[in-house]
Image (cartoon, rainbow, N blue to C red):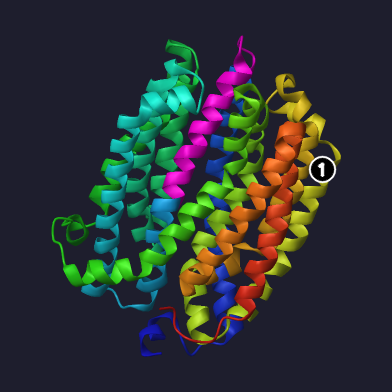
Amino acid sequence: MTALSHHGAGMAPTETLAPALRRAAVVTVLRIGLLGLWFFALIRAYRAIGDLPGGLAEAGTLALLMAGIKLFTSALSDPFDLRVVGQVPALAEGPARVAIWRAAQQGRLLAAALVLLAGLALAGPLARHLLHAPDAAGAVRLAALAAALEMAYRGYLSDNQSRERFGRFLALEAALQLLRIAGLLIVARVAGLTAAGFLFAYAGATALVLLPAILLSGAARARLWQVVPGDLAACWAYLRWIVPAMLLAALVERLDIFLLTSLRGAAEAGLYGALLPLLLVPEMVAGFAAHALQPRIAEMMARGQLLRFWGGVLRLTVPLAALVGLGVALLPGAVIAATIGPAYAEAAPALRLLVLAVMAWVAVVPVPLSAVAMARPRLTLTITVVQAGLIAVAGLALIPSHGATGAAVAVLIMRLGVGAMVCAAALRLPAEPVP
């Protein structure tokens, strides 16, 4: 327990919980403001694309490629984040912290390079067989570039997160969102907004903010050429379990859009995919809060006080999620008309189901999910396999006949079932340090 002393290991649980929640609230509110700007830009982009001739199919292409970016950044970047924030907060500032982060970033950069090379090599076949649009190969290449750049950038975010330097963290996030919005405005004015133009702006903004992120990381953390086999081996001992789990989880998370594209075509995928930005705010709010709390979650597990911490969070999240979910579920058509536009009006039943699924998840699951992923990577893999089975079986049964609505029902089934499993697993975590 001595490694935790600089965090105030002698403090009462309520004394530790209150400052952590306040800091998480401040960070989350500021990131919500940035997210609001990006949310508005994304909604306007889908609205503009939907109004074009063949716009639903173009929207489907964009939705599928953005899902691909999310798949690879989640599966091949989040595990490194978990490794860093699960280990670094319990250590004093110094070489040990640097070594853990450096090994994680080296592995992350290798994964990013592999994603980029695979995207460049397979762009043609993916455009023909997955998107059913051979002329979309350029958009596929841009998506691969965007994913690789985002993975590299997020490594520097995790460094600031793990050391709880949230001012610098927020400055980088603000620069990224503002550059993305500026890029979209420029592309829309100069060439008109398409899936490829959107991805060009998205990747360009990440490239521009990556340089200051590197410069702000500090000289010791810039020496990524220094390879220490023991550090890499320790990192791999964790990643060998969590990466397959995260890869499967990321695939499952957007399996709905992949199944829709293959079973019902790009237009149906566009109808459904345009709804995803409407769910971005609650999903990202929960994600931002979980990221801000992850260092404290790791400490609470080590001190055997996770359940008390989780209970304090639930008192805030459950009523807020219930209020938002009920409001959207009662008026899905009005929400669609006011945001992504009348071109997507047929998706109102799907939106109602998706909002219920997302709100049930964000109300309860983020804290136990972070705890289980950090402490029990093999169990995380098992839960993810069950998750994949639920969404695949439900999706294959419902999507061919019910399209977007069937996909939404499949997501609801999966979220409720897996959420219950994650919570049950967190309740059984022993009071011991995170491995």
Question: Quarter-wise, where is residue 261 in the image?
Answer: top right
Span shown in magenta: 50-74
Left or right: where does residue 165 sit relative to residue 231? right
Please tell me which residue lies in front, 8 or 286. Answer: 286
- Residue at the extreme right of the image, as rendered: 330
Left or right of residue 164, residue 214 in this image: left
Q: In the rendered view, tell whether residue 251 sits above or below residue 259.
A: below
Q: Please provide percent x and percent y for residue 350.
A: 76, 37
Q: Is residue 71 magenta?
A: yes
Front-lying residue, 403 or 76 = 403
Q: Quadrant of residue 304 in the image?
A: bottom right
Q: How crowded is mark 1: few (under 14 residues within 10 Å), some or many (20 or more)?
A: some
Residue 181 picture location, percent across and down: 47, 29
Q: What residue lies at 68% left-to-right and 75% top-to-bottom?
A: 311
Mark 1 belongs to which amino acid? Ala
Residue marked by disc 1: 329
| Residue at image location 50% in from the left, 53% down from the top | 248
Relative depth, front residue between 147 and 244 = 244
Q: Residue at x 25, y 48 (%)?
A: 214
The quadrant of the rendering that contains the N terminus is bottom left
Q: Find residue 186 and report its horizontal and vertical position in percent.
A: 43, 19
- Queried whether the magenta region covers residue 280, the answer comes back as no
Work out whether 59 lies above or below 25: above
Residue drawn at (53%, 32%) of the image: 64
Residue 235, located in which quarter of the rendered image?
A: bottom left
Dominant SS type (magenta): helix
Can you give x and y, in whole percent of width and height, for residue 348 in the image?
79, 32
409 up-or-down from 49: above or below: below
**Quick check: can you spot residue 293?**
no
Q: What element carries label 1?
A: helix
